[in-house]
Image (cartoon, grey):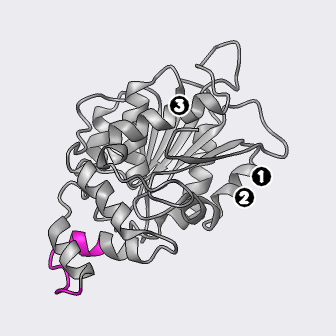
């Protein structure tokens, strides 16, 4: 697999003639927390979808590289593509309905999916992006304040940094030093959704109380083929558990390529 990634491929019990679904989790989470614990894996298996679940570097069962460059978004995308090839994914083909992949990404995983779809339209058929926005909260993460707090200093003042740090600290098995190294790498490659637009059909999903999903309407307007679903009363923290989200994603990914 990609040199720093733990990748799990799960063949559906009764697979449908559709591409596998690549699952990309968020910052401070893991495939197990984001997709297994929230019922997504069971739901998609019941829907006949084969799954490829990736743990990003420094998360879950993946390695914790020392070199910050291994956490850069561009490097993570390269490793994800390598992992897809190694699990048997082939480019999209009109003659093979199971070729390529569909993608579901949440939070940081949505950012990586947007860029992956823009860079590799030969591999990605459709995408569902959860909690996406035009701003990059990790790019403005106050790294020094977080390090001071973790060293026993005063709590972080910046609310976004404090929220992200809390998420990371709440995840079992997380090595905070690895996550802070990831933050430092992401700050060198902040998200710019307009640099390249994914041309495949997109479903953009967020809770209507999600403060990180600012600009979701602009993403929909600028993407060549985008739709938006807002989940009433849901936040960035709990939108991923919504049954409405799962239903909409499964239906969207069951459609044809166009």
> Mark 2 or 3, which is nearer the eye?
3
Q: Which residue, as the protein is rendered here, is positioned at the far right?
A: 14
Q: Position of residue 87 (x, y in %)?
A: 66, 33
Left or right, 48 with respect to 183, comes to right
Q: Which residue is mark 3?
A: 82
Quadrant where the image shows the N terminus? top right
Q: Which residue is mark 2?
A: 42
Asked whether residue 203 appears in the rendered view, the answer is: yes
Mark 3 crowd level (few <14, some 14–19, many ≥20, 10 Å Cα): some
Earlier-in-chain disc, 2 versus 3? 2
> Can residue 116 be found in the magenta stretch?
no
Q: Which residue is mark 1?
A: 46
Q: Position of residue 113 (x, y in %)?
A: 43, 40
Residues under labels 1 and 3: Cα distance? 28 Å
Residue at position x 39%, y 26% in the image: 119
Left or right, 19 with respect to 5, comes to right
Earlier-in-chain disc, 1 versus 3? 1
State the SS at label 1.
Answer: helix
Left or right, 74 with respect to 158, comes to right
């Amino acid at each position: 697999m990609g040199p720093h990634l733990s990748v799990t491929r799960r063949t559906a019990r009764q697979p449908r003639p559709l591409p596998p679904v690549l699952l990309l989790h968020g910052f401070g989470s893991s495939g197990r927390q984001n997709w297994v614990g929230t019922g997504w894996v069971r739901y998609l298996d019941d829907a006949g979808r084969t799954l490829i679940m990736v743990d990003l570097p420094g998360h879950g069962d993946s390695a914790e590289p020392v070199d910050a460059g291994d956490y850069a978004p561009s490097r993570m995308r390269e490793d994800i593509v390598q992992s897809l090839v190694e699990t048997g994914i082939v480019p999209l083909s009109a003659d093979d309905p199971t070729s390529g992949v569909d993608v579901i990404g949440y939070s940081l995983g949505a950012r990586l999916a947007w860029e992956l779809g823009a860079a590799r339209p030969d591999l990605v058929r459709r995408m569902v992006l959860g909690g996406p926005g035009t701003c990059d909260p990790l790019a403005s993460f106050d790294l020094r304040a977080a390090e001071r707090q973790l060293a026993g200093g005063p709590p972080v003042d910046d609310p976004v940094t404090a929220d992200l740090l809390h998420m990371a600290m709440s995840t079992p098995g997380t090595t905070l030093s690895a996550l802070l190294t990831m933050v430092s790498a992401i700050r060198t490659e902040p998200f710019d959704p307009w640099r390249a637009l994914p041309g495949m059909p997109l479903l953009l999903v967020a809770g209507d109380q999600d403060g990180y999903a600012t600009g979701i309407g602009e993403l929909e307007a600028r993407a060549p083929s985008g739709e938006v679903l807002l989940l009433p009363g849901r936040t960035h923290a709990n939108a991923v558990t919504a049954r409405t989200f799962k239903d909409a994603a499964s239906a969207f990914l069951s459609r044809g390529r166009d």
